[in-house]
Image (cartoon, rainbow, N blue to C red):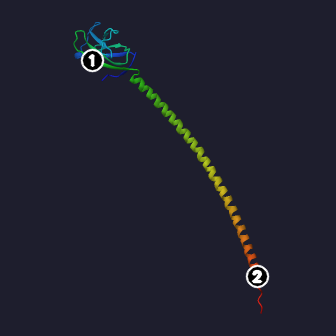
Amino acid sequence: MAEAVYKNNEVIEVVYQAPNKESGLTGVTAVEAEIFLPSNAKDSNFLDVALVELGSTGIYTGTFTPDEVGEWKVLIHKSDGDGQVVKRYSVGDYNVSAVGENVAALDTKVDTNASATDANVDAKTAVTDGLVGDVDAKLDTNSGVTDGLVGDVQTKADTIENKVDAIDIKVSSLDTPPMVS
């Protein structure tokens, strides 16, 4: 498993802890790193990377820049070949920290857009609620008017019915012969 995902054509720092934290290893070849391509062939484009000690810590660092996507291997050791360590670096078109930063930026945009959308929905809901209230009020008003008109029509129908009944009574009295005594 590689230590991290690095971006192609960007500098990679190689870190090596000497055995027993051995300090004071000096010179160009005191600690070196041999670079191997993703094909496992030794990279002839790189001279072995000379590592330099950080203070007197026994920790040595150096850098190289990969020029190909894939799994790079670095063999690190003291000049006598002792203390060999192999480190692997997964190199791709993107590095993990840049992807993380992009995701964080997108999360911020999504949160901002979601908040704006929520505000728009709330505003439109308030307008809709107002319009629904207006429609309800008009329905109530029209219902009152309609109820009044229906009442008036019913009253007139009742009056007409009473008049028809009165006419029926008068007609039926004409149809009945008078009684002889």
Q: Nearer the viewer, residue 101 or 86?
A: 86
Secondary element type, mark 1: strand
Q: Earlier in the sequence, mark 1 or mark 2?
A: 1
Q: Amino acid at mark 2?
A: Asp
Whole-percent x and y of residue 17?
27, 17
Query: What type is the residue that disc 1 sits on?
Result: Val
Foreground residue, 169 or 82? Answer: 169
| Residue under numbered circle 2 | 175
Give the percent coordinates (x, y) of residue 120: 56, 39
Horizontal side, residue 31 vs residue 174: left or right: left
Say which quarter of the image contains residue 70: top left
Judge whether residue 123 can be spotted in this image. yes
Q: Residue furthest top?
A: 27
The image quarter containing residue 143 is bottom right
Which quarter of the image is occupied by the N terminus?
Answer: top left
Q: Which residue is mark 1?
A: 86
Label annotation for residue 109: none
From the viewer's side, name the closer residue of 120 and 6.
6
How far apart are labels 1 and 2 at the CA level?
A: 129 Å
